[in-house]
Amino acid sequence: MQREPNTKKDKENSLWETIDLEEEKKGLPEEALDVKMEEGMLAKVHTACRGGTNGVGSDGFGRYLSDSQLRNILTQARKKSLRDYCLFYLSYKHGLRQAEVTLLTWDMVNLKEYRIWIPRVKNGISGFHPLTKHEKDCLERYYRLLRNKGKLTRYLFPLTCRAVRKICERYNFHHHQLRHTCGFHMALANIDVLKIKSWLGHKNIQNTLIYVAHAGTEFNNIPKWEIF
């Protein structure tokens, strides 16, 4: 799915850099930080990501975010910007790439049915994803905020990929880490690999198996043995 060039949208990016959203200062409730991960799984994430085992690249960023990193990012965004919080949370929950974030439009969101259309790039498989109540509430609030400020456009996030990248750099992480973390957490939760493949929009299951291999959940049910 390709979007036609939109010069008007590019001009709107500067507005987002200086926009003063008074309602954002109120922040989101503490339950907003609940990323729907059980404590046992969070411990696994912390262990797996500790000591560089999460694939730290030459840029110093790991492939996955630990539970503390993810919560810190969401905490900061909750205090600073409702836009940033919605962007990060949706990207994590639905494994969005930067380009996919910029493709999201309000007509892809069905709040009454708790659904959102996820447009995939790189020949990925697009489709509907369910929305949680928390996501629905955040999007409703975000929509009202934009409308009241006169900043409502066709796009949820009228930004370029470069602008998305810059926003994430302010929080000291790379946007693609949210997509990797989504797949990793799904694998840790023992979700079927075919469902993870469908959720992330992978055409090739080999891309999905990477998360399963890193999570190590395929070894959970093998019999224990002793060498001596």
Image: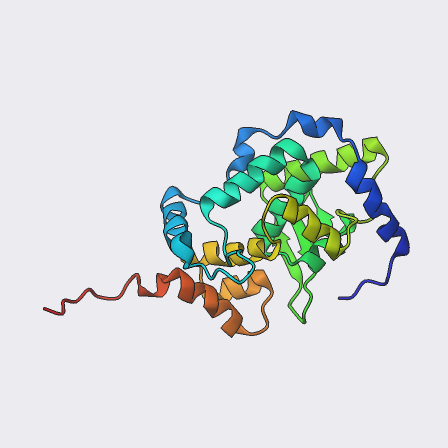
Relative side of 56 to 151, left or right: left
Residue sitting farthest toward the left: 228
Residue at x 42%, y 57% (from the top left corner): 52
Q: Nearer the viewer, residue 227 or 162?
A: 162
Quarter of the image with the N terminus in it? bottom right
Relative side of 62 to 25, left or right: left
Rendered view: 211 above or below 94:
below
Q: Nearer the viewer, residue 107 or 77?
A: 77
Quarter of the image where one finds residue 48: bottom left
**Percent of width and height locating residue 223:** 21, 66
Is residue 163 visible from the viewing direction of this image? yes
**Percent of width and height locating residue 213:** 41, 67
Quarter of the image where one finds residue 171: top right
Q: Nearer the viewer, residue 98 or 35?
A: 98
Residue at x 38%, y 42% (from the top left corner): 39
Q: Nearer the viewer, residue 218 or 113?
A: 218
Rendered view: 146 above or below 202:
above
Is residue 114 visible from the viewing direction of this image? no
Residue at x 46%, y 69% (from the top left corner): 209
Rendered view: 11 above or below 187:
above
**Percent of width and height locating residue 226:** 14, 67
